[in-house]
Amino acid sequence: MGYMEILIGGIFVNNILLAQFLGNCPFLGTSKKMETAVGMAMAVVFVLVLAGVITWVLYAFFLVPFKLVYLRTIAFILVIASLVQFVEMFLKKSIPALYAGLGIFLPLITTNCAVFGACILNIDKELNFMKTLVQSTAYAVGFGLALILFAGVRERIILARVPKPLQDTSIGLVTAGILSLTFYAFKGMI
Amino acid sequence: MAKTFTQEFTKGLWEEIAPFRLVLGLCPVLGVTTTVENGIGMGLATTFVLVFSNLLVASLRNIIPSKVRIACYIIIIATFVVVTELLMQAFAYPLFLKLGVFIPLIVVNCIVLGRAEAFASKNSISFSIADGLGIGIGFTLSLAALGAVRELIGANNLTLWTTPTSVIGLQEVFGANFEPFAFMVQAPGAFVCLGLMLCGMNLLGSK
């Protein structure tokens, strides 16, 4: 697989939200307003790329040589949790504007399946270091793209007259299905 | 608040049935429910983690300092997820391969962490086990229901369990002439199907 293929595949064809179903809680939870969606998308891009690279290094240079592969799940979640904490402290000190923009979304990322799932998928696919970097970036951009598109659609739904039982999450899920269908059309690209 | 063991158990089955009422833990709900079998397998794995993490969190609730409690809960949950992974590799390897990335993802399933924080950290051990069992079985039932709808319409089958030699379940439920509606077993169908089921539950609940 070439780098271009990984990039396009990660953003469109195997979109982490709409084709792989990872990170759906923040997808539905933070997409009601464009502002929160942009904040969440930025936070995920930031953490997912860092986490993807760091977990790859941890796996290749620590877990495999010491035969601790079965502890992968526990090791990765610890790394992600401390990474999020560290990024939060770093941003607070050095880039307060960005920190204020991301707000509460940064700590929430610890339990975002998209970040953890992407790290596990990278390892399962046995990618090398550069490919992991490209793949993580592609997943992160795909997440942001889908979330921001969906938030745009959802802001319009508020203006529509939706039948009572379908309101809120229910219509959100159906809309996500239609959005997922449009991404499905990218299947022929690769 | 004189709640009994049974009440804590049954509330997870309808009142607070996890994916529908709380809209938590949607990733496995959407990702693995292409067949009933996958749904049940995923549900049981989650129930196992839920019960044991609730048990441990409840028994340690007076020892864990409140400042670092979330980190402690995550470590407890991750431990049981690793146990589940190893057990499934030993005893249910085909199912483990089918569920793939979603087994390690139980760690970040909001339901498990949510129950630890909202229930087990404040209640006694026996109540916490009842709560874990109830929510877990409710989760399993919802996964199985969604899996049943998607598999029936999308593949015209109903697989309950696969053994190495045979398949327990129904084949060609609507007859051989039924053309399966493949949309349902693919990604977009999952969202639409869950959305419509949620709508149905809202209709039932509003009466």
Image (cartoon, rainbow, N blue to C red):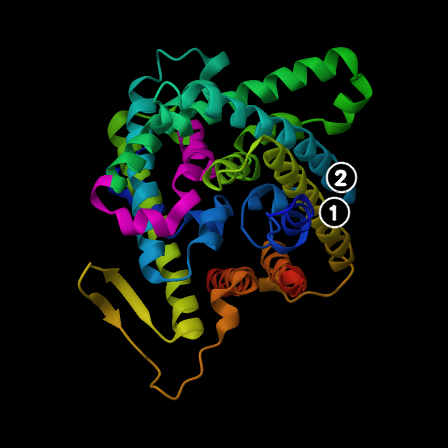
Q: Nearer the viewer, residue B141 or B190?
A: B190
- Residue A117 x, y percent position in the rendering: 51, 39
The answer to whether A51 appears left or right of B108 in the picture is right
Q: Nearer the viewer, residue A160 or A9?
A: A9
User: Does the CB distance between marks 1 and 2 fall below 8 Å?
Assistant: yes
Residue closest to the far bottom:
B177
> On what subunit does the disc labeled 1 rest?
A
How far apart marks 1 and 2 lie (CA) works out to 6 Å
Q: Secondary structure at mark 1?
A: helix
Chief secondary structure of the magenta portion: helix
- The residue under label 2 is A38
- The residue under label 1 is A148
Q: Is residue B176 something that shows in the picture? A: yes
Amino acid, disc 2: Val
- Residue A68 x, y percent position in the rendering: 35, 23
User: Crowding at label 1, few (<14), some or many (≥20) Cα neighbours within 10 Å?
Assistant: many
Q: Secondary structure at mark 2?
A: helix
User: Crowding at label 2, few (<14), some or many (≥20) Cα neighbours within 10 Å?
Assistant: many
The numbered mark, 1 or 2, whose residue comes first in the sequence reads 2
